[in-house]
Image (cartoon, helix red, strand yellow):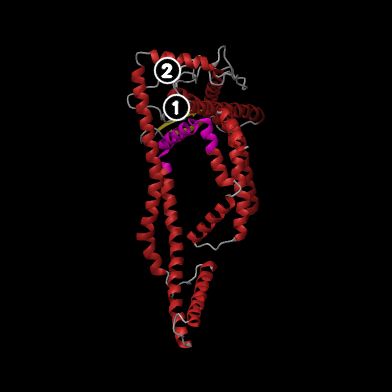
Amino acid sequence: MTNPIVSGVQAYLRFSRRWLMGTPERALDDAYEAALRIKAIEDNYFGGDRISFSKGNYSSSARTYFQSELRKYLNVAKLRLAEFRTSSSILQSDRPAAEMQIDETTPVPYEINILDRAALIPQKLAFVDSMLARYGDRSPSGSALAARPDPNPSLNGMQPFDSSAGPGRTTKRQPDIESIVDKTGVLPRSILRTADRIKRELDPNSEQEVMEDFYISKRRTFIAVRLVLLLIIIPLLTQQVTKNFLISPLVERYRTPDTASTFLNQDIEDEAFDELRRYEERLRFSSLVGNAPPLTEPEMTSALQEKAQDLQREAMAKSNNAVKNVFADLFSVLAFVAILLSSRREIEVLKSFMDEIVYGLSDSAKAFVIILLTDIFVGFHSPHGWEVLLEGVSRHFGIPESRDFIFLFIATFPVILDTIFKYWIFRYLNRISPSAVATYRNMNE
């Protein structure tokens, strides 16, 4: 009889060996996918040419986005290609040379192709090498098959959304003069941009291009504002509708004083007891000062009993409302996530719209916004605001207030936010707008 522990160890070793043997293939696939993404940006935004802004009409935020995407994918391709070279020289894969692959992009019945794995590797290497050489990064793979990239790579099927394209508008083919990874030129870039702007203004088709740009900007603004409103209104409506018409009847039916505790947590109980004690003291005070007739002991007991019943109903309503909020907010979060998952293209437009707004502000306005946000969330007086916010959240969900947790949260979370703010200023804003950083430092001093 086979020992189950030995069988489990053997299965784990077999799985580990298969995973280790597949390292070269995974590394090459990642490098190939990064190269495909660069090719997709070229095809969708630069007419198939190399990514260049020498004659482009993109905004500064769009240029920064393309530059960061290009550098990211180039680094991924070089790193994963080096991993492929190292792992393939050490490991010897024992997988079959051919395998069955189903092309899921074709309608049923599927077309079944036999792909020769050994023949597919040189093609991927050639494509990755050519893409790296296209941007001045010679491939470290040493492959002699670095030919021009495949104009129609079909192994990925990726089609990025061009948020700047409008109806009937095609992306202009931009000549390959200067890559965004180039450092310097013969003339200052400001002079080149000024000359390019004058040339565009003298172009007979400039009026049509201005109208097209206005239509695209208008359409982008409409999509961004509509998405923001949907992200706010739909979750709120979902929370209210589910709470009042779906969850409330169920909670009030199954959670009654006979079947559940009146007090959901210690805070609600203490609040009810304090109110009852204050009510008794108020009655006695009114009787002693002559504002009300003296109450006998049975009358006092009857008045306190009536007040206790009212407080019980109020405490039960608060407890039931906290339970309703938990489930209603869960449905609201699901609605919010559903909107995000179904609006990926609109999210790209919203990101472009927000980048244009944020980076389009003046240096003093950027510094003002940064100081305002940092002072609110991580400033000297921010702990009081966080304390009020956490207490409100606790009451909303019926969670007992823990002072230790609140103080620990205030001592750690604002520090993390402050670090994120400083990293963003140092990593991105300092590179995009150094003058805004200088203004921020002067204003903050």
Q: What's the magenta region?
A: 340-368
Q: Position of residue 348 (x, y in %)?
A: 44, 34
Left or right, 217 with reference to 23: left
Q: Amino acid at mark 2?
A: Arg
**Quarter of the image holding residue 291?**
bottom left
Query: Quarter of the image containing the N terminus?
Result: bottom right
Q: Main secondary structure of the magenta part?
A: helix
- Tell me if I can see residue 11 in this picture: no
The correct choice, above or below, for 431 with respect to 400 in the image is above
Question: Label 2: few (<14), some or many (≥20) within 10 Å?
Answer: some
The residue singled out by tag 2 in the image is 173
Q: Position of residue 196 (x, y in %)?
A: 46, 15
- Give the secondary structure at mark 2: loop
Mark positioned earlier in the residue sequence (1 or 2)? 1
Q: Position of residue 370 (x, y in %)?
A: 55, 38
Q: Amino acid at mark 1?
A: Ser
The residue singled out by tag 1 in the image is 154
Which of 388 and 101 lies nearest the eye of the viewer? 388
Query: Quarter of the image containing the C terminus?
Result: top right
In the drawing, what numbered circle is on residue 82? none
Q: Is residue 366 magenta?
A: yes
**Quarter of the image holding residue 106?**
top left
Report the Cα–Cα distance between label 1 and label 2. Answer: 22 Å
The correct choice, above or below, for 360 with respect to 293 in the image is above
Residue farthest toward the front in the current orientation of the protein: 290
